[in-house]
Amino acid sequence: MKKLLVLLFSAVVLSTSGYADNGAQRAKGTAEEPKGEVSAYLAGAYISVADAETKLKAGGFEVLATYESVKDGHTIIFTCPSLKKEAAKPNRANIAVMKLFVDDETKRISLANPLYFGKAYMQQDYDHAVFSAVAAKLEALFPDLTPSADKMEFGKLASYRFAPGMPFYEDVDFLGEGTSAELLAKLKEYKKGKDFIYEVKISDDTTLVGYGLSAGTKRFVTKIGRQNAGLLPWPIVVSGGETTTLKTEYYITLNYPLLDMTLFREIAPSARDIIKDLRKPFK
């Protein structure tokens, strides 16, 4: 009888210990989302493009390309399995990459904040545990990062639009139609591939492409602030027999949350030129 009681007690202990352990794992995997404002970027001390690429690769990130977004400034585009997995969810391709802007002029670096862009692009599909893990990994690789002044209420990012009547995330511009293979070929062949900066294959039918803008078109960046030039190259999604891109009014103002309406009106012609540039390969 005594042995039976001991066995029963041991079973209870093991059972409750298992539940406690599972509960702890669940709690660890569901970090609490930020309250209040969150910065769009994480700024840090200068590091060369080559050294930044080395750090990213050593940290397990895949460097896709480096692009001269402004004079004396380069955007490093990178990804990882976690970002690709999230991007594979319906209408989430834009989250497949993160960007690091290295400014040789001001001697600063600026990292896209995974929490900020994750919430904006993933909306109701946002998994804070995933994006906080990516952010923690980047902060370990680039210590002493500080939040940028460009901020927005975290809770409002999922339904962000610049102003009433302006587009939301899902309000895209259509650039061209055809099979994925045909559309990718056109992007790669136009101007002998000069503006085809990177591609991330997300699924059999979905690819995220980074595309360069003409020198005249991308001048708007210097007008509204080179510190956020990491928004370039421009993202294009090839999926379901068509190519689409985020509305310029959405993408520019999301990347420049301090932009006011007066300055936005000044660059409005550039916003229209962007779509003209992106449609040229499909004519």
Image (spheres, grey):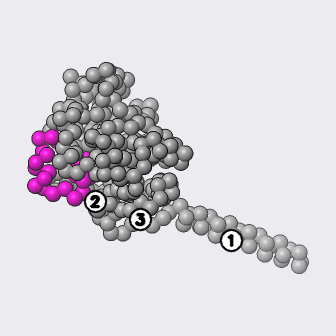
- Residue 184, numbered label: none
Residue occupied by mark 2: 150
Q: Helix, strand or loop at disc 3? A: loop
Residue at x 68% of width, y 71% of height: 16
Most foreground residue, 29 or 267: 267
Amino acid on which the number 2 mark rests in the picture: Asp
Does 225 sit above or below residue 1? Answer: above
Q: Position of residue 272 (x, y in %)?
A: 15, 38
Residue at x 35% of width, y 32% of height: 197
Q: Helix, strand or loop at disc 2? A: loop
Q: Find the magenta span and give its range.
A: 250-271
Label 3, label 2: how far apart the Cα atoms are: 19 Å
Label 3, label 1: how far apart the Cα atoms are: 29 Å
Q: Can I make out residue 122 in this image?
A: no
Eye-nearest disc, 3 or 2 = 2
Q: Helix, strand or loop at disc 1? A: helix
Does 135 sit above or below residue 68? Answer: below
Q: Main secondary structure of the magenta part?
A: helix
Asked whether 282 falls inside the magenta stretch, the response is: no
Eye-nearest disc, 2 or 1 = 2
Residue at x 59% of width, y 67% of height: 23
Q: Position of residue 228 (x, y in %)?
A: 28, 50
Q: Is residue 6 left or right of residue 22?
A: right
The earlier-in-sequence mark between 2 and 1 is 1
Residue occupied by mark 1: 16
